[in-house]
Amino acid sequence: SASAIYQDMPGQVIEAIWAAPNAAIVPSLGRNLAGNAATFAVPLVPANTLFENRIRRLDLRLSKTLALTRVVRLQLNLDAYNALNNSAIQSVNTVFGANWRQPLQVLDPRLLQVSGQLTF
């Protein structure tokens, strides 16, 4: 027997968060930040307007069942996870600066697994 799972998901939202220092905020606010905060997080990109590429993943399974005796069966499996070997970005650095949009996590690489199950 054979089976497949195909996933097609939207990419991560692209954000740019600037840690605005108190010195940059004082002129427009007219006072220091409350609670002696050193910075304030300012979003530079409107929410849900920019996205990374879509995440597409294909998992496959081939399975063969063998009847060894009348009551003993052996099932052999070959699984291929991320068969397309897609390296889509799953999370990125959202802090605006030199490392902005640096990938923090990508889709796992192609993986083959051989397994079996003995039923008696």
Image (tube, rainbow, N blue to C red):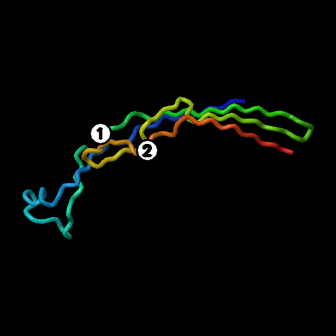
Q: Quadrant of the N terminus?
A: top right
- Say which of 90 and 98 sits in front: 98
Amino acid type of the residue that numbered disc 1 sits on in the rendered structure: Thr
Say left or right for 27 vs 84: left
Amino acid type of the residue that numbered disc 2 sits on in the rendered structure: Gln
Instruction: Determine the image quadrant of residue 51.
Output: top left
Q: Which residue is mark 2?
A: 105
Instruction: Determine the image quadrant of residue 30.
Output: bottom left
Q: Residue at x 10, y 60 (%)?
A: 26
Instruction: Determine the image quadrant of residue 118.
Output: top right
Q: Is residue 75 above or below residue 24?
A: above
| Crowdedness near tag 2: few (<14), some (14–19) or many (≥20) residues, C-alpha within 10 Å | few
> Which of pointers 2 and 1 lies earlier in the amino acid sequence?
1
Q: Secondary structure at mark 1?
A: loop
Q: Which residue is mark 1?
A: 49
Say left or right for 88 vs 6: left
Q: Secondary structure at mark 2?
A: strand
Q: Which residue reaches farthest front?
A: 98
Residue at mark 2 to residue at mark 1: CA–CA distance: 21 Å
Q: Residue at x 42, y 39 (%)?
A: 89
Q: Which residue reaches farthest bottom?
A: 35
Q: Quadrant of the C terminus?
A: top right
Q: Is residue 35 above or below residue 80?
A: below
